[in-house]
Image (spheres, rainbow, N blue to C red):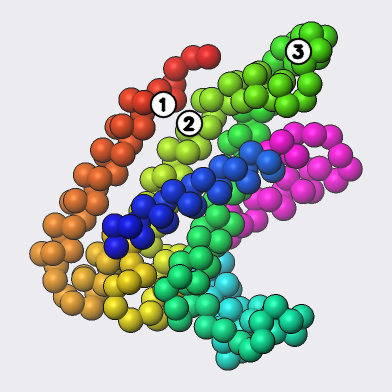
Amino acid sequence: MLLNTVVWVVVVVSLTVLLSLILAQFLNKPFPGRTFVRMAVVVPWAASVVMTTTVFYYGLDSNYGIMNTFMVDIGILDSPYGFTKNVLPALGVAIIVAVFVSIPFTAYTLLAGLQSVPEDALEAAKMDGAGPFRTYFSIVLPQLRGALAVAVLINIINVFNNLPILRIITGSIPGYQADTLMTYIFKVLQFDRRVDIASALSVVNFAIVIVIVAAYVKIVKPMKEI
């Protein structure tokens, strides 16, 4: 359970930030239809998380899921597979959904940071002969420090406390092997009717979040000026 929680948070946040950096860099460049693409990126974030997760859940159903059927038709699978019926694939699907719905907010946060990078600094680097990679890692990325710190912190909190995605994707798996702290608390409260244990675990969960946030702010100093 604790291991699942750590893996869940680290993998989702890492993938979200990495993919959002790439997407933000792309959206910051002028190209035909950029406004439309920027609007389209918002859709996964604006839509209901429960609705989005449910689409993935039923789409991957081994009996009638359209995604499952498509993978069989094109030869990726020999036969329909129960992605949401087994621990590892279910957690993998949950991670994909979490990254999918987290990217829009993170990408726009980083895009705002990219648009605040001084043009004269980029021009100076170009005149000094710095290549694209040197310019990005020496000038652009340091300027994104504040936006990155805020994006990572908010994602850590959201992903750690996430219940709907994991509840829908892993809810049909018996036992506690696919549980994180949040889904375990839900099961203890909903199925075992142990309000006392659920309340105690909720306090522990809150304390863990506070410690993580305090340590992160102390180490990263997101409000520190560049």
**Residue 204 drawn at (x, y percent):** 19, 51
Q: Which mark is residue 220?
A: 1
Query: What x and y, as percent, mark residue 4?
Result: 36, 60
Circle 1 residues within 10 Å: few <14, some 14–19, many ≥20: some
Residue 108, above or below 66: above
Amino acid type, label 1: Val
Residue 46, by quadrant, is bottom right
Considering the whole magenta stretch, tell me its main secondary structure.
helix
Element carrying mark 3 = helix
Could you tell me how far apart the alpha carbons at marks 3 and 1 are, in whole angstroms?
26 Å
Position of residue 153 in the picture relative to residue 38 (left or right): left
Residue 94 point in image, percent of width and height: 49, 65
Q: Residue at x 33, y 57 (%)?
A: 3
Question: On the image, numbered disc 2 is attached to which residue?
Answer: 149
Measured Cα–Cα span from mark 3 to mark 2: 24 Å
Residue type (three-letter) at the residue carrying disc 3: Ala
| Magenta residues (range) | 24-49
For label 1, the SS is helix
* Res. 1 image quadrant: bottom left
The numbered dot on residue 125 is 3
Question: Residue sitting at 78 percent across and 21 percent down?
Answer: 131
* Residue ID at (26%, 39%): 210
First reached walking from the N terminus: tag 1 or tag 2: 2
The answer to whether the residue labelled 1 contacts the one labelled 2, judged by CB atoms less than 8 Å apart, is yes
Residue 44, magenta (yes or no): yes
